[in-house]
Structure formats: structure tokens, C-alpha cells
């Protein structure tokens, strides 16, 4: 019942897809969003985006990621790193 080998490569591709989307959207400056509003555009569930945003906030060197506020869902703030 071990299903731990496949998800790591799957997660990497999802993380890269989300990172590319965010870099493109933040090209002109900061951007605020809720996962549920970009889920269809990225092809991920809001829950997947939320989990990946936590990872990106810790590891992304090309983006500044900040958990901005929480009102019915987390709002994230991103901008290109200086």
C-alpha cells in the first residue's frame, strides 16, 4: 500500500507549472490572488495550490511570496524578486 514514489515527480511538475504561471502574472509588479480563482487557469485544485504556495514561499528565489490575509480563503501576494 505504498504510494510514495510517484507523487514527488508529479508534485515537481505541478510546482513548476504554478511557478511559471505566477512569474508571468507578476511580470509587471505585485499580484494578489486566492487559489480558488486561479485553479482552472493552472489546472490544479485550490488545495493543491495552497500546499504549493507554502513550498514556494520557502523556496522560490525568483518570486517574493507572502501570505497576505485570510477571509474565507487565503489571499497570497506575489511579486518578482529584486
Image (cartoon, rainbow, N blue to C red):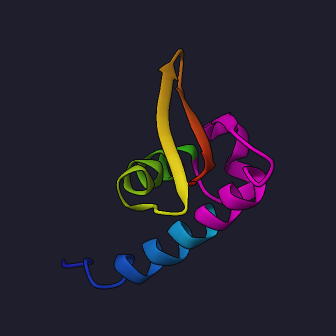
Residue 61 inside the magenta-drawn segment: no
Residue 15 in the image, given as x and y percentages of width and height: 51, 67
- In the image, residue 18 sits, relative to residue 57, either above or below, namely below
Q: Residue furthest front?
A: 82
> Residue 56 appears in which quarter of the rendering?
bottom left
Quadrant containing the C terminus in the rendered view: bottom right
Q: Nearer the viewer, residue 1 or 17?
A: 17
Residue 47 in the image, given as x and y percentages of width and height: 48, 45
> Residue 24 appears in which quarter of the rendering?
bottom right
Q: Residue furthest top?
A: 71
Quadrant containing the N terminus in the rendered view: bottom left
Residue at 25%, 77% in the rendered image: 4
- In the image, residue 61 sits, relative to residue 73, either above or below, namely below
Q: Nearer the viewer, residue 67 or 81?
A: 81
Residue at 69%, 39% in the rendered image: 30
Q: Which residues are magenta?
A: 19-45
Residue at 61%, 61% in the rendered image: 18
Residue 39 in the image, given as x and y percentages of width and height: 67, 48
> Residue 37 appears in which quarter of the rendering?
top right
- In the image, residue 34 sits, relative to residue 43, either above or below, namely above
- Taking 67 as reference, is 31 left or right? right
Residue 46 in the image, given as x and y percentages of width and height: 56, 44
Image label count: 0
Q: Nearer the viewer, residue 67 or 34?
A: 67
Q: Residue furthest right?
A: 28
Residue 20 inside the magenta-drawn segment: yes
Q: Nearer the viewer, residue 19 or 35?
A: 19
Amino acid at each position: 500500500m505504498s504510494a510514495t514514489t510517484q507523487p514527488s515527480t508529479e508534485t515537481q511538475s505541478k510546482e513548476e507549472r504554478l511557478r511559471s504561471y505566477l512569474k508571468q502574472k507578476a511580470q509587471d509588479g505585485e499580484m494578489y490572488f486566492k487559489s480558488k480563482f486561479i485553479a482552472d487557469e493552472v489546472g490544479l485544485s485550490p488545495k493543491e495550490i495552497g500546499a504549493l504556495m507554502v513550498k514556494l514561499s520557502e523556496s522560490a528565489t525568483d518570486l517574493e511570496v507572502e501570505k497576505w490575509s485570510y477571509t474565507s480563503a487565503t489571499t497570497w501576494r506575489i511579486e518578482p524578486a529584486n
